[in-house]
Amino acid sequence: MAPKTILLLSAALFPTAAAQNFPYEKPAKRYTPWQSLSSADQSTAESSLGYTPITWNVPALDPVEQFGWWQFTDAQKSGAQSLGLNEDQWDCFINHYTSYTWAELVQYDLSSAYETLGWSENSWEGNAATPASESKWWGQLTESEKEAANQLCYFQDNWNQVDMTANDSYFPFPFPAFRYVPWDELSGAVQDTVETKLGYTSADDWNVLGNNTAEWNTFLNLDETQRAGALDLGFYTHTWDCFVNHYDALYWDSLYGSLLTAVETLGWNEESWTTRSTATAPDTESTFWDDLSPQEKAAATALCYFKETWDGDDLTSFYDYSNKQTNAIPGNSVPSDMDFSIFAGEWSPGSNWVPGQAGQPKSLETTSSAKVVSTGALALAIAIGAFIFQ
């Protein structure tokens, strides 16, 4: 890797918890939603760097962000520069130096920031467990950890991959209508994808949600082939974890903000969540949607349940075969039988959606989510193994 000079800010330059002080200027265009980019910038992002609308709108999702500038081709460097990114900004804000070896982090005075976050040479190189900071939401980091993260060009939105995808629904993330198409309505190509990559082997396996073991895992816990299949379908980290897994695979300590409020409203506590015993499961687990209270319905919605998925209905029972679409597509207004006051203004992890509202701004430059989920360095997490899930 070519030598370079790294400018790091000392902790003394971070006088308040709210301050965002970075070694380099934040690249505003990278934190602009895909739908707000010019057609020329979209074309550059696609052709030069391989971004798609989804992987652009979710920081750290695209494989190109696993690479440091020193690994780029001339075409990739040119594309990044056209999007307003220079070498320092890419390595800090986009790659966060995860392409460096530990020796290189030491060489460029970067290791101390990662050490503050709990990393060591052994954990960085994959020979020891990842640190506790990797399982924390931004709001759970200590002030010193936040300062260290700032030195690595993390801030609460990119630390947590806050989704910039347009979302007019009352769910935290865009509704994945494609998942609610019955098996016999899927194209041959889609059936092949879900069979060969995700292991759905029959109509019963696909049409009854939760039957397939892949759905018991979060996106990061899927193996490489399964993640590729999920991406092929149109899923990504947040939509899979919310609409497919409903955060069931998270450890209790990883539930934070609106997620913790949601599961507690549904009657879970740390013991019942951890043991998952029928003896300790809350009453809501055996309650049909129509019998849930308005607050419980709001809590379930924050976990991306809706009536048909909560009740375990077969996909064929709520699919409109005449119009070729699911009858479960949500409207743009919040149903009157839901009470979102339980969240008291809390934000949804990984999203700028506010519980109880439909349609939120998505720019990471102009919005700030108060409680968002941490994935830290996604590429490193995948390489080393999942760390916050059961």
Image (spheres, rainbow, N blue to C red):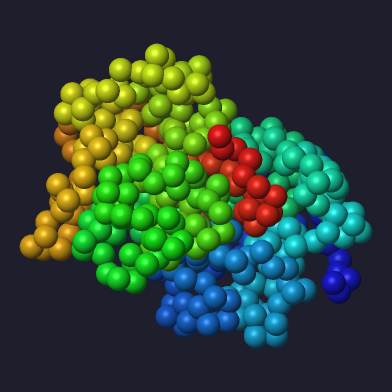
- Direction front: furthest residue: 201
Residue 272, percent across and down? 46, 19
**Left or right of 76 on screen, residue 237:** left
Residue 88, percent across and down? 74, 67
Tell me which residue sits at (79%, 42%) in the image.
Answer: 128
Residue 169, percent across and down? 28, 50
**Left or right of 348 on screen, residue 209:** left
**Left or right of 169 on screen, residue 27:** right
Q: Quadrant of the N terminus?
A: bottom right
The quarter of the picture where residue 264 lies is top left
Tell me which residue sits at (8%, 62%) in the image.
Answer: 322
Q: How many marks?
A: 0
Above or below residue 79? Residue 240 is above
Above or below residue 259? Residue 191 is below
Tell me which residue sits at (35%, 43%) in the image.
Answer: 211
- Direction top: furthest residue: 279
**Left or right of 213 on screen, residue 174:** left
- Direction left: furthest residue: 322
Residue 251, percent across and down? 55, 31
Above or below residue 370? Residue 380 is below
Front one among 238 and 3: 238
Tell me which residue sits at (84%, 46%) in the image.
Answer: 122
Front one among 186 and 65: 186
Q: Kindly tell me whether residue 16 is visible in this rendering.
A: no
Q: Quadrant of the C terminus?
A: top right
Q: Kindly tell me whether residue 345 is visible in this rendering.
A: yes
